[in-house]
Image (spheres, rainbow, N blue to C red):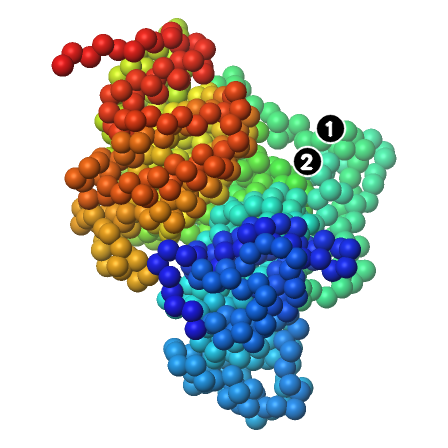
Amino acid sequence: MAERSSTAPVLEIKGLNVYYGASHALQGVDLTLPHGVLSVVGRNGMGKTTLCKSIMGLVPSSSGSIRFAGQELRGLAPADVARLGIGYVPQGRRLWRSLTVDEHLRLSAGNKGPWSIDRIYSTFPRLGERKNNGGGQLSGGEQQMLAISRALLLNPRLLVMDEPTEGLAPVIVSQVAEMLVKLGEEGDVDVLVIEQNIGVATRVADKVAIMVNGRINRITDAGQLAGDRELQQRLLGVGRHGEDAAAKEMAETASVDLPSMAATLTKIYLSNPTTPTRWSKPVPVRILEQSARIQSSAATRSGVDHTELRPLSPGGEPIVLVAGTLDTKGEELRFIRDLLMAEGVAVRLADLSTSGKHSGADIPAHQIAAFHPRGASGVFSNDRGQSVEGMTIAFERWIKSRGEVAGIISAAGSGGTAMVTPAMRSLAVGVPKVMISTIASSDVRRYVGASDIMMLHSVADIEGLNSITRSILANGAQALAGMVKARQQQARQTSMVEEKPAVGLTMFGVTTPCIQQITAQLKDEYDCLVFHATGIGGQSMENLVDGGRIPAVIDITTTEIADMIAGGIFPATADRFGAVIRKRIPFIGSVGALDMVNFAAPDTVPDRYRNRLFYHHNPQITLMRTTPAENTEIGRWIGAKLNEMDGPVRFFLPEGGVSALDRPGQPFHDKMADVALFRAIEETVRPTANRQVIRLSQHINDPAFSDEIVRAFGMLTGGGRQRPPKVRRS
């Protein structure tokens, strides 16, 4: 079995091409699984199973590379691939009909490791009950359990699973998903999962690779894919059903006045009234008839009911929204509304209930539900989970249509928090957002994201008014009122002041002198927005770039990419630099703090890194020096992104060191690692007159390096004065 390497990814595929006759099945596939669990999704016929078979040596590849822990697999027989430590769960199970469950397991058991026959039976009790039954006597779900168990008993280093939940009942799907999550957490087995079930694929892995036409189209964050129905539909053909036919029916509401409409009526049928799954049965005709909607030609022409498009206040002045499920949190939300009104704030109550009950809200639930792509029928259904998901989508779309929201507040448990926060995130940075939640004391990254949502822990459950909830809800309401009024006052005071153009900068503690020197020279002409490069910091900056708030970037500290490549706690997403690529804005970049990967306390460092060079920044942050191999991978990743930028680009390489810890005599000084990083970037980037990589002899924190950055920025933006070199007194 292959030993775990401290630097080599467990699986690295580059330029893989596979043909079936004249058919080009895999077209230059590039895919890397550093460690952990990676899901691969895609439509049928995109090459996912071929990818699995190529890894296992079951189909020959014409070119490219497949490396397992640094060892080339191309050309090896399937048995040799398995002996190296790769387990395979094939699509279609491939069991012996005449052998019993126990005989299957005893044939596979042998390699010493954590997986034993007893553990299999405890993980899948149903197999224990059927241990004396033959493979041909098992149900489809039981056969799939046995196929998974057979692979686990080899105690592999890498597990390749092709559609592991196919044919399983929902309860078993959940059990398999939990097992995969646990495998990823334990770290003993790395897993490549080919999966059609988007819920499973995004649950078991942090990253999901999407295959389109024999290529890896992109690798995206699992949480982003799980919540992005548009992306699912565009790339996978899943996630939305009947939306194309119903896109023009967004305005359907419970209050439609049919007699006032034109006489022409159309009956709209949805072939799937509820979102289908692989276990769905054909929908009976009577259900289709019952779920059909009547749509008038007048409504089709208008597109949206006029009630929904009225201003939220008569004069069109900005208002504050109190949003939530009034059927379960009505008393608490009305308490917040009354406090805001007492503070003199214009407020409206928005109902997000999915029960269909009348609530007396200023913005009733059916008006918001009408903004679902399939209209109100996309929200109000017999499936509570589908209804909540539908209202989440509808509320985000609704709030994006409003231009007069001065602030928003909500109070909820986990479900309501997940429903409201996507809409909060869609509001501009600076618009006050307060989420009073029972889960605010836990990890709230997936709720806050890169936005400025204020999460306030409710302490007690939000279930009626009592001495605790009154105090917490009042604090949230008064905090929001203060923020809204202060923001309005500030807007009046600055309305006549010309704003400076903004520039985004990235900084870490070890690149602070560089950024301070740059901002000192630019602050008279630019609004310098500095972002802490902690993963979310880079996302926040790029969100503002996407929103048009930042027209130029000085991205000195790109350390988040090192954490993404090596598994640190402050990782970038696969879309790092994406906003700059889309907006084509001037970009100045460098390699600040790419000499380090961030982990929490020392005991959180993964076992595979135990023999590396560390620097204990503080009791809660442990820094690990990157190696030449890691820096090569980082450099190639950055170079590929730079090649996608069509705007003016200058990328600087400081030969004197990339952070305060990377100087001669400092703990992370490693000339070979820096050379590998610089070489990889230069070899990958395709230089043009608009895109240049520039080497400088200085250290990244040297004043002369900062001067060159400022001079290049002035030349790229064209708006600033062309600064001559500064004369510095010794």
Nearest the eye: 293 or 716: 716
Helix, strand or loop for disc 1: helix
Image location (x, y in percent) of residue 588:
41, 24
Residue 251's label in the rendered image is 2
Would residue 593 appear left or right of 43 to someone viewing this image?
A: left
Residue projecting furthest to the right: 264
How crowded is the residue under tag 2: few (<14 C-alpha within 10 Å), some, or many (20+)?
A: many
Residue receiving disc 1: 302
The residue sitting at 20% across, 12% down in the picture is: 728
The residue sitting at 49% across, 53% down in the picture is: 32
| Circle 1: residue type | Ser
**Is the N terminus in the top left, top right, bottom left or bottom right quadrant?**
bottom left
Nearest the eye: 206 or 431: 206
How crowded is the residue under tag 1: few (<14 C-alpha within 10 Å), some, or many (20+)?
A: few
The residue sitting at 24% across, 38% down in the picture is: 662
Helix, strand or loop for disc 2: loop
Label 2–label 1 contact, CB within 8 A: yes
| Circle 2: residue type | Ala
Is residue 564 at least partly visible in the picture? no
Image location (x, y in percent) of residue 63:
62, 55
